[in-house]
């Protein structure tokens, strides 16, 4: 009879345990591979070093002399 | 689609047992239920008619406990096999992550198997699920019947398994092949687990 041959949890409790073992392993692998990585803090942009005398015409006097020379 | 929810630490997967009427879908779930340890036995919901046919669907929540820090649940459903419950089958298929097609090995049931498989494909497509890629396992059930009454595994596989997915010989009434099938479909579903897409701001 089918009912007689039907396995029960008592006589074959291993089926679910085996299933759990396999699935647990699979989930562990999957979860690990999908775990969102913490976002790395974006590195602060390095400012281009500006020399302290940038933009200054250091030889101002000479420039004026040259301009006067040109006008002449 | 099954999703790993890192916020709530949950994994939930929906697996649907599909197939023609009386192929053994409910018997599969009953065997799984019978093997659950007491502490994991929730309620198996089975809506059957007085002739023991599945009227609406069976539902077996399989709470696997916490695995790798995630509360893991498999929801197993069956659909009613009878042709006239088409709408119910469609409803149960919604959001399925994987399907087990339970075929009846009896030679005289071959046409019903084919019809049910075609119905599955049509309903999957209607629900926006790709019949060519959704995790699927074939189960050729009732292998305990006399050899003269059943088709060979090779014949069944050639006729029904055109996607060449994993297939299993089973005798669900005795429990044979039931967990092998479940393990296979669970594995396929898990391999497609994905993290939820980030919300757009």
Image (tube, coloured by chain):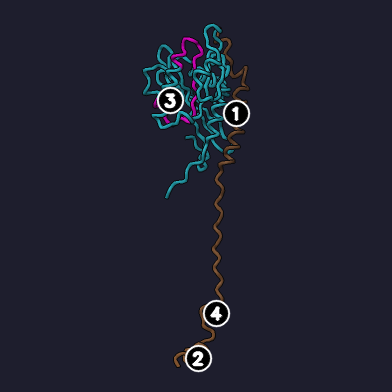
Chain colours: A brown, B cyan
| Element type at mark 4 | loop
Q: Indicate yes or no whether the magenta region holds residue B109.
A: yes
* Spatial CA span between label 4 and label 2: 21 Å
* Spatial CA span between label 2 and label 3: 91 Å
| Residue contact between numbered discs 3 and 4, judged by CB atoms under 8 Å | no
Marks 3/4 same chain: no
Sequence-wise, the earlier of marks 4 and 2 is: 4
Tag nearer the camera, 1 or 3: 3
Nearest the viewer among B130 and A14 is: B130
Q: Which residue is mark 1?
A: A20
| Element type at mark 3 | helix
The span shown in magenta is: B90-113
Marks 1/4 same chain: yes
| Element type at mark 2 | helix
| Residue contact between numbered discs 4 and 2, judged by CB atoms under 8 Å | no
Q: Which residue is mark 3?
A: B121
Marks 2/3 same chain: no
Q: Which residue is mark 2?
A: A65
Specify the subunit that label 2 lies on: A
């Amino acid at each position: 009879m089918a009912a007689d041959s039907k396995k029960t949890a008592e006589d074959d409790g291993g089926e679910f345990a085996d299933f759990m073992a396999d699935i647990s392993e699979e989930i562990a692998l999957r979860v690990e591979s999908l775990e969102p990585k913490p976002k790395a803090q974006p590195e602060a942009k390095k400012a281009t070093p500006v020399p302290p005398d940038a933009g200054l015409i250091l030889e101002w006097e000479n420039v004026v002399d040259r301009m006067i020379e040109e006008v002449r | 689609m099954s999703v790993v929810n890192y916020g709530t630490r949950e994994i939930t997967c929906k697996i649907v047992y599909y197939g023609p009427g009386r192929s053994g879908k409910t018997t599969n779930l009953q065997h799984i239920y019978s093997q659950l340890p007491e502490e994991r036995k929730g309620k198996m919901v089975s809506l059957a008619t007085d002739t023991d046919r599945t009227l609406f669907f069976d539902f077996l929540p399989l709470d696997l406990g916490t695995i790798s820090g995630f509360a893991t649940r498999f929801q197993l459903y069956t659909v009613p096999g009878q042709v006239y419950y088409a709408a119910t089958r469609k409803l149960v298929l919604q959001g399925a992550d994987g399907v087990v097609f339970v075929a009846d090995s009896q030679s005289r049931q071959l046409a019903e198997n084919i019809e049910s498989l075609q119905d599955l494909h049509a309903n999957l497509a209607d629900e926006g699920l790709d019949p060519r890629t959704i995790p699927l396992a074939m189960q050729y059930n009732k292998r305990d019947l006399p050899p003269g009454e059943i088709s060979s595994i090779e014949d069944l596989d050639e006729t029904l398994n055109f996607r060449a997915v994993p297939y299993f010989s089973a005798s669900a009434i005795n429990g044979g092949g039931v967990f092998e099938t479940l393990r296979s479909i669970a594995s396929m579903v898990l391999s497609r687990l994905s993290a939820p897409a980030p919300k757009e701001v």
